[in-house]
Image (cartoon, rainbow, N blue to C red):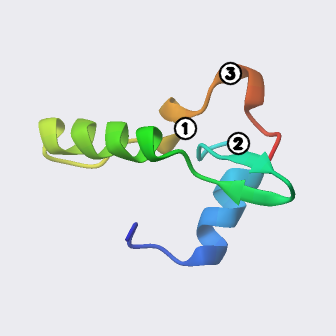
Amino acid sequence: MLGMSQMTVYRAIAEGSFPAVKIRGRLIVPAKALAAMEDAATTAQGVVDSADYVPPSTAGAP
């Protein structure tokens, strides 16, 4: 769906540059964050930085 490997997504989450929350040991990417990134990419007709969608208080804490 994202056009990148699963391991790349896990690494980005671990370094705090991709939005996710941990619930009962599972990493969950909020649908609202994906929708916001999709809307921004469509509007800009290009790529967006996923780190812009990570809340400052959770950056680097998967």
Label 2, label 1: how far apart the Cα atoms are: 7 Å
Residue at (54% x, 78% y) in the render: 5
Residue at (79% x, 49% y) in the render: 23
Tell me the SS state at disc 3. helix
Q: Quadrant of residue 45?
A: top left
Q: As shown in the figure, which amino acid type bears the numbered disc 1?
A: Ala
Name the residue that disc number 2 marks.
Answer: 16
| Residue 38 % position (x, y) | 28, 46
Horizontal side of residue 52 vs 35, given as left or right: right
Tell me the SS state at disc 1. helix
Label 3, label 1: how far apart the Cα atoms are: 9 Å
Residue 2 visible: yes
Residue 15 visible: no
From the image, which quarter does the N terminus lie in? bottom left
Q: Which mark is residue 51?
A: 1
58 lies above or below 41: above
